[in-house]
Image (cartoon, grey):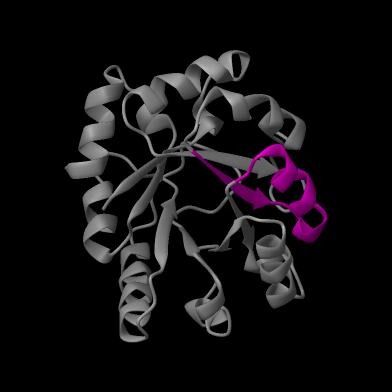
Amino acid sequence: MIKLAPSILSADFGNLAAEIKKVTALGAEYIHIDVMDGSFVPNITVGSPVVKKLRPVTEAVFDVHLMTEHPETQVAAFAEAGADIITFHIEATRHAHRLVQTIREAGCKVGVALNPGTPLTMLDELLTDIDMALIMTVNPGFGGQKFIATMPEKIAILRHTAEDNGLNLDIEVDGGINGETAGTVREAGANILVAGSAIYEAPDMAAAMEQIRNG
């Protein structure tokens, strides 16, 4: 089943509660929350206090994507704030397996993200211990970037690896997802689609979400 994860990076930050209600009323299962620190990526976004304030707004899955250096220092705060899934970048930590355990012990599902230039082999020792792999289809840091056309092959290889090993792995994609690119990643094996500007800047939000989900 394809699930949508609208990214609030493209929402109106002055009205985040209303923006979340809009997309969940239209069937979004997840809310994707990009946490940027100005170091791992050049932009800066929201922290755990914002997530805590937003948690009562919806029962949708809070999908917290840590684009930060030293993500291990952020886990406890975001888990307490109401994150359901915490995803960290494999490039940002020296002790990935320990961090997987830390997130699990905090009561959250575990995601691991790979930048476009990071090989899938970086996940080899973690696949049996995580719930979700996030394949970045742009270089992280800003919304509205162009989809990298070579990423569907990476998604397909990961999906085949998961199936060959009997793993019930969610594959999320983030970056440049819209009505044109969504079909490609769905066919490749992604089942959770993050979209920001394609949803929040669409003239017809409902139609945009339906096209991303089903084509």
Q: Residue furthest left?
A: 215
Give the side of residue 205 with respect to residue 50, left or right. left
Residue 196 coordinates in the image, percent (x, y): 44, 34
Q: For residue 83, what is the image quadrant? A: top right
- Residue occupying image coordinates x 60% and y 20%: 13
Q: Position of residue 28 (x, y in %)?
A: 37, 34
Q: Please say whether residue 73 is one of the residues in the magenta stretch.
A: yes
**What's the magenta region?**
61-83
Q: Residue furthest right?
A: 73
Q: Residue 34 at x, y = what percent? A: 60, 41
Q: Residue at x 30, y 71 (%)?
A: 156
Q: Nearer the viewer, residue 96 or 25?
A: 25
The picture places residue 47, in percent across and down from the top left corner, at 74, 36
Q: Is residue 77 above or below residue 91?
A: above
Q: Number of numbered discs present?
A: 0
Tell me if residue 37 can be seen: no
- Is 123 placed left or right of 167 in the picture? right
**Residue at x 26%, y 24% (from the top left corner):** 206
Within the image, what quadrant is residue 14 found in? top right
* Residue occupying image coordinates x 76% and y 75%: 95
From where the camera sits, is residue 11 visible?
yes
Q: Quadrant of the C terminus?
A: top left
The answer to whether residue 164 is left or right of residue 140 is left
**Magenta span has 13?**
no
Look at the picture and state if 116 lies above or below 64: below
